[in-house]
């Protein structure tokens, strides 16, 4: 990197660190540290949560997927459009979960089931989480090593330390500082600032790539694939292993079942000002993600074109030489695109992309550290203690736990070798917990007959089957040298099916009394006093039937909210209609390659660039507004020491009236 690149990298990071230090002053209670005292607005939740998916490891995983399947797999993802839209607009799981006022998922489990089940879920969720997170710092550090063209090892006395290990230690130290300083308040503010800056930087990277490569050059590389493995024609891509239509169909099922189950950003689920604000954050995410999708596609396309088009053969030779010097075979596959980007991006733009990667690492890893560290305290230590922590002691223990997770991630990343694709490893480790958790969550929030016995049975079933799959996969690969017949996604999918059946059957057999959902959700006679409506609002007749109710729009939606949600639904359903028509057309006569190239040029390049500009302006305004509002709310709120995650008699302690 040039001096200009380093300056471009340093300035935004200094802004982020200053924000982290400033926001620390607003932490006065456990609820502040864990959930920002439930004061976050929709744009803050949306932008901060989106930065979780902007780290180096996410880019590497996305590049890995695109280099194998290209655009073809994204075509089949259109099948999920109606499902994902209705889940987001209706607030499936998230709305009811926020109504419980639980700060962690396992706290909800104690409210709904039992304390023993909370501890069990806390232990299982914590272990699955740190295993899942364990590879993230290492992959991110490796990507930066090769992108910055640093040496693979550093001489230390008579030893040679892998450079990525040293870099990983630095990154984890920074992210631990962010997570410890002000808990989720600091994490959200840092992530929001990073997200706003990233929106601007995405445009810089996109236009730089457009100046370096023509669509003709990209098209020639995309179409140079053997039959059955097309990167542009989804009906000629069924030979692509792992990333195909079956991969998509299993993931659609997982999207529904696992809603709210994975806790890598658990604090955001409880930090919303109201359940509706949490729901609107999910809807807004649908608009904002279009910009990030564009930059990932552009960078992956640029790297593939640079590596395989004859016009860039001289530069590609240097990339292939650098890749060939990597000793680890899996790392070669993962780092090919970052190395190519290091060679092809011009000065200045290289620094911009480096900032995007670093901010994603700091924001995403800090969120992980906060989530898994706080789960260990809140869902294992707190329910096991007979006497609650004092506020100061509680905050100290939370910070020490976060440091412990950072140390584990460092050791795990330094010594563990990933044998599967990154996304496959994530799917597999998530299945350890969510294979059974999905049944307990959905059943617990929506079904009065769900029982503690059913939750136990489903959790154990899903966990045992998933862990068994991990062990079988490792033994098959390392001991026998044979590829295991199921990948991580498939193992999790089948474990989930069995867990659902076990939950339903066991609950029906053991239900003696229906659970009081209204009290848990603070509805009906248990609802807090609501602000009185204006005369104009009270005079409006309630619409009993309408298209909005079908997709989840209810009385909480303002006129502006309806435009945002309805616009997202209409836009995506338009393209779902295109998907249906074109799919039926291709059953009769396959589209020529030129038509597919034109389709992807419009939908994957032109339109995302437009949305990158629009959402960049829109969300910058919303994010800045919500940050100011959050600080104002935190200054004005009254601290409640009882709001610390303790549950008594299936109620949060601060709701029982006890002291």
Image (spheres, helix red, strand yellow):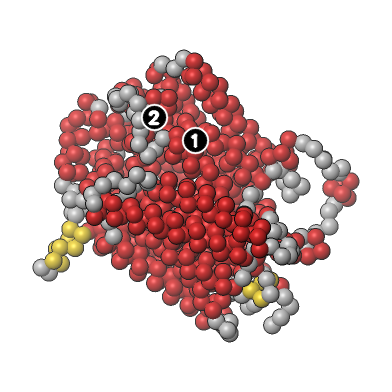
Identify the mark at residue 64; answer none if there is no mark.
none
Q: Height in image: 615 above or below 55?
A: above
Q: Height in image: 646 above or below 603?
A: below
Given residues 157 and 657, the one toward you in this image is: 657
Determine the residue positioned at 43% across, 65% down: 127
Of all residues, the one furthest to the bottom in this rendering is 387
Where residue 221 sits: x, y (%)?
Answer: 30, 26
Say whether disc 1 or disc 2 marks the residue closer to the N-terminus: 1
Q: Height in image: 535 above or below 74?
A: below
Of all residues, the one furthest to the front in this rendering is 509
Location of mark 2 (residue):
238
Q: What secondary structure is found at the residue carrying circle 1? A: helix
Residue 644 picture quarter? bottom right
Determine the residue positioned at 17% across, 50% down: 327
Determine the residue positioned at 18% across, 54% down: 151
Residue 526 picture quarter? bottom right
Q: Is residue 512 left or right of residue 45?
A: right
Q: Height in image: 579 above or below 387?
A: above
Determine the residue positioned at 76% across, 47% down: 555
């Amino acid at each position: 990197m040039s001096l200009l690149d380093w300056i471009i990298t340093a300035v935004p990071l200094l802004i982020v660190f200053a924000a982290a230090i400033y926001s620390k002053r607003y932490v006065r209670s456990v609820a502040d540290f864990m959930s920002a005292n439930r004061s976050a607005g929709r744009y803050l939740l949306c932008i901060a949560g989106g930065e979780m998916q902007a780290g180096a490891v996410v880019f590497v995983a996305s590049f890995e997927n695109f280099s194998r399947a290209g655009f073809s797999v994204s075509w089949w993802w259109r099948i999920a459009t109606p499902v994902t839209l209705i889940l987001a607009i209706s607030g499936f799981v998230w709305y009811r979960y926020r109504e419980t006022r639980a700060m962690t998922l396992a706290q909800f489990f104690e409210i709904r089931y039992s304390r023993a089940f909370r501890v069990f879920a806390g232990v299982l969720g914590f272990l699955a989480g740190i295993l899942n997170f364990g590879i993230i710092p290492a992959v991110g550090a490796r990507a930066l090593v090769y992108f910055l063209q640093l040496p693979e090892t550093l001489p230390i006395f008579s030893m040679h330390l892998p450079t990525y290990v040293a870099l990983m230690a630095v990154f984890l130290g920074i992210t631990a500082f962010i997570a410890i300083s002000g808990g989720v308040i600091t994490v959200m503010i840092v992530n929001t600032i990073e997200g706003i800056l990233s929106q601007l930087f995405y445009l810089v990277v996109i236009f730089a790539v457009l100046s370096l490569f023509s669509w003709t050059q990209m098209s020639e590389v995309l179409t140079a694939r053997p039959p059955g493995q097309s990167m542009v024609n989804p009906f000629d891509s069924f030979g692509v292993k792992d990333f195909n239509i079956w991969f998509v169909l299993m993931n659609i099922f997982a999207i529904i079942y696992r809603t709210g189950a994975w806790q890598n950003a658990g604090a955001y689920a409880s930090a919303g000002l109201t359940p509706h604000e949490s729901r609107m954050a999910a809807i807004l995410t649908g608009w904002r993600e279009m910009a990030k999708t564009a930059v990932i596609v552009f960078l992956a396309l640029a790297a593939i074109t640079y590596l395989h088009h004859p016009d860039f053969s001289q530069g590609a030779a240097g990339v292939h030489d650098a890749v060939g010097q990597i000793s680890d075979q899996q790392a070669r596959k993962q780092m090919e695109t970052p190395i190519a980007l290091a060679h092809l991006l011009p000065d200045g733009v290289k620094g911009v992309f480096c900032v995007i990667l670093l901010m994603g690492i700091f924001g995403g890893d800090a969120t992980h550290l906060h989530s898994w560290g706080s789960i260990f305290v809140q869902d294992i230590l707190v329910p096991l203690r007979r006497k609650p922590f004092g506020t100061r002691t509680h905050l100290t223990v939370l910070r020490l736990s976060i440091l412990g997770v950072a140390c584990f991630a460092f050791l795990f990343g330094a010594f563990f070798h990933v044998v599967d694709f990154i996304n496959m490893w994530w799917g597999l480790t998530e299945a350890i917990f969510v294979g059974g958790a999905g049944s307990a969550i959905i059943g617990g929030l929506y079904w009065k007959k769900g029982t503690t016995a059913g939750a136990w049975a489903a959790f154990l079933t899903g966990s045992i089957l998933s862990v068994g799959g991990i062990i079988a996969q490792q033994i098959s690969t390392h001991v026998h040298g044979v590829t295991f017949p199921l990948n991580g996604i498939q193992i999790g999918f089948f474990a989930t099916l069995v867990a659902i059946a076990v939950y339903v059957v066991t609950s029906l057999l053991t239900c003696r009394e229906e659970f009081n959902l209204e009290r848990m959700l603070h509805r009906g006679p248990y609802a807090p006093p609501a602000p009185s409506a204006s005369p104009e609002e009270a005079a409006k007749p309630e619409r009993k039937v309408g298209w909005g109710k079908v997709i989840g729009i209810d009385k909480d939606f303002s006129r502006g909210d309806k435009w945002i949600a309805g616009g997202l639904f209409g836009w995506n359903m338009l393209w779902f209609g295109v998907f249906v028509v074109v799919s039926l057309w291709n059953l009769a006569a396959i589209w020529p390659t030129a038509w597919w190239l034109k389709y992807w040029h419009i939908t994957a390049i032109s339109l995302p660039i437009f949305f990158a500009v629009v959402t960049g302006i829109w969300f910058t305004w919303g994010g800045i507004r919500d940050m100011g509002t959050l600080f104002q709310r935190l200054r004005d709120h009254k601290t409640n020491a009882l709001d610390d995650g303790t549950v008594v008699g299936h109620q949060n302690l601060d709701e029982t009236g006890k002291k």
